[in-house]
Amino acid sequence: MTELKRVAIVGSARIPFARAYTAYGEETNLSMLGTVLSGLVERHGLKGEKIDEVVAGSVIKHSRDFNLAREALLDAGLSPRTPGPTMQIACGTSLQAALMLAGKIASGEIESGIAAGADSVSDSPIVFGDKMQH
């Protein structure tokens, strides 16, 4: 039996909570996720670095966000060689991403990862125009 590696969380970042249609009323899941990842990249000196995997998603996402994790990691300045799979699980995306990455690290499949999630009810995936959406 292979011994599992220890897993540790070495950093975190988030944006403050806000009520719907207020502080982030004009933001998208991508812009919020990109902002948080950018802060993490800056704080830990990861600009241009390849991370083994960045897994992220949102509770409810637009079809335009099909590649949300990948686009956010590129916006944040991580290496384009970093894979960024997107997942979607209601109210548990970032937790599921963290558990998945922890399993990969523990088994030796990867050495490092970033788990993330975003959600904004202000950016509901309604297929009508912006005026109708708001």
Image (cartoon, grey):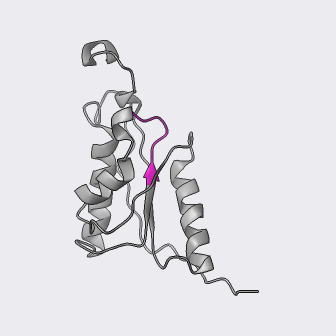
Residue 37 versus residue 104 in the image, above or below: above
Specify the principal SS of the magenta part.
loop
Query: Which segment did they paint magenta?
Result: 56-62
**Left or right for 61, reference 72:** right
Residue 128: quadrant of the picture: top left
For image coordinates 44% across by 55% down, the residue present is 85
Measured as percent of width and height from the top left, residue 32 is found at 31, 46
For image coordinates 39% across by 21% down, the residue present is 126
Q: Residue furthest top?
A: 132
Q: Residue furthest right?
A: 1
Residue 98 versus residue 57 in the image, above or below: below
Residue 91: quadrant of the picture: top right
Residue 62 versus residue 86 in the image, above or below: above
Q: Is residue 114 within the magenta segment?
A: no
Residue 65 versus residue 25 in the image, above or below: below
For image coordinates 48% across by 79% down, the residue present is 111
Foreground pick, 68 / 39: 68
Measured as percent of width and height from the top left, residue 127 is found at 36, 19
Measured as percent of width and height from the top left, residue 47 is found at 23, 71
Total number of numbered labels? Answer: 0
* Viewport quadrant of the N terminus: bottom right
Measured as percent of width and height from the top left, residue 99 is found at 59, 62
* Viewport quadrant of the C terminus: top left
Q: Is residue 59 within the magenta segment?
A: yes
Q: Is residue 116 visible?
A: no
Q: Is residue 22 visible?
A: yes
